[in-house]
Amino acid sequence: MPEIMNLAYVTLYVSDLALLRDWYVHNLGLSIVWQSPSFVLLKGTGGAMLGLHQGAPLAEPERVQLHFEVPDVDALYETLYARGLPFRHGPQEMPWGVRMAALRDPAGHTVELYTPLPGRGFRQHPGEPAASRPGGDAGTGGR
C-alpha cells in the first residue's frame, strides 16, 4: 500500500472569498499562507491547512477537494495507475511550485497528490500574490 505522508489541505468553495477569509483569520486565528484573487490558503497551529476558493465547484457533487503532499508523486502515480485508478491527469509541474497528479474518489471528489518543487512551492513564498492557485484547475487529461 502506498504511503500518503500528509493531508496538506482541504478546499472549500465559497461565494464570498474575502468574507470567509476574514472570518477564519479574525475569529479562529488562522494565518494567510498564500493567496491569489480567487484562492486563499490558511493555516492554524497544526499541520493541515484550509483552502478557500471563490466560485462554484468544478463538478457536482464536488464541494470539497483533498490535497495530499507525498514524497514522490511520480512513483505514487505509477503505483496507483498500475492498479487501474482513473486519473484526471498524471504528474505535471504546476505554476504554484508543485508537481501534481489528480484523480477522483468514488464519490467524485478531486484528490490531488503533489510533491513540492524545491525552492518553488507556495509554502516557501507565504502571501505572495499569483495568477494561479494550488489545486483544481489543472485540466482533465489522463494517461
Image (cartoon, rainbow, N blue to C red):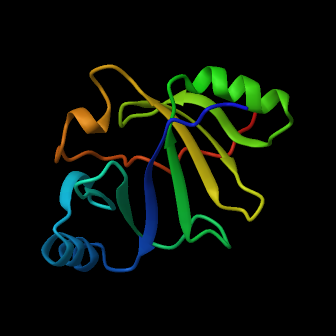
Camera-nearest residue between 39 and 115: 115
Residue at image coords 28%, 77%? 20
**Residue 35 image point, x, y percent:** 25, 54
Q: Is residue 110 left or right of residue 29?
A: right
Q: Is residue 66 left or right of residue 124?
A: right
Residue at image coords 60%, 28%? 91
**Residue 92 image point, x, y percent:** 55, 28
Residue at image coords 30%, 73%? 17
User: Residue placed farthest to the left in the image?
Assistant: 26
Q: Quadrant of the N terminus?
A: top right
**Residue 8 image point, x, y percent:** 42, 47
User: Residue placed farthest to the right in the image?
Assistant: 84
Q: Is residue 36 above or below residue 23?
A: above
Q: Is residue 101 left or right of residue 131?
A: right
Q: Quadrant of the C terminus?
A: top right
Q: Quadrant of residue 21?
A: bottom left
Residue at image coords 39%, 34%? 95
**Residue 14 image point, x, y percent:** 40, 76
Q: Number of marks in the image?
A: 0
Q: Quadrant of residue 79?
A: top right
Q: Is residue 121 left or right of residue 7?
A: left
Camera-nearest residue between 75 and 134: 75
Q: Is residue 105 above or below residue 71?
A: below
